[in-house]
Amino acid sequence: MNRESFEKGLKTRREVLGSDYVDTSIKNADDFNLPLQELVTEYCWNEIWNRPGLDRRTRSIINLAMITALNRPHELKLHVRGAINNGLSKDDIKEVFLQTAIYCGVPAAIDSFRCAKEIFKEMGI
């Protein structure tokens, strides 16, 4: 693990997902899943999220669509929070999910709408 890349990724991960979530994930990591936390933080959150080619808002839009297509509700909830933190509005998120309904399937989009509503309620928006 490259410590500098990890720290840069950790900073970005906290800014997008929130320090509480990230710190809990790192703190709860054990010998089995710590290598995954390190890998995700260093490569996903530094090498990809910190690239100059796309802004964070755009990356969030792409993630919401892909995670909907993969039908991963736990990750979707996390990235709905991240999308809000990256400047997307409820209406923006709604439009992403409507688009995915056509291209990824209505059941996947319905689950994404449900997950987003839970997060909006938790966040008071």
Image (tube, rainbow, N blue to C red):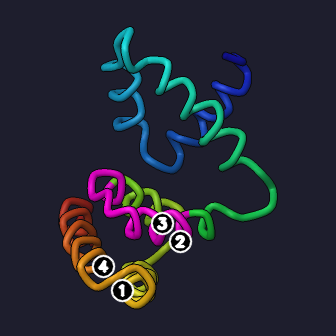
Mark whose residue sits in front, 2 or 3 = 3
Q: Could you say which is closer to the camera, residue 68 or residue 54? A: 68
Label located before the other in sequence (1 or 2): 2
Q: How many marks?
A: 4
Please state if 43 lies on the left or on the right of 94 as rendered: right
Label located before the other in sequence (3 or 4): 3
Tell me the residue that label 4 is attached to: 109
Q: Is residue 74 magenta?
A: yes
Tell me the residue that label 3 is attached to: 66
Instruction: State the separation of the CA atoms marked 3 and 1.
Output: 12 Å
**SS assignment for the magenta stretch, majority:** helix
Q: Are marks 1 and 2 in contact (CB under 8 Å)?
A: no
Mark whose residue sits in front, 4 or 2 = 4
Q: Which mark is residue 61?
A: 2
Tell me which amino acid carries mark 2: Ile
Label located before the other in sequence (1 or 4): 1
Residue shown at 51% from the left, 63% from the top: 63
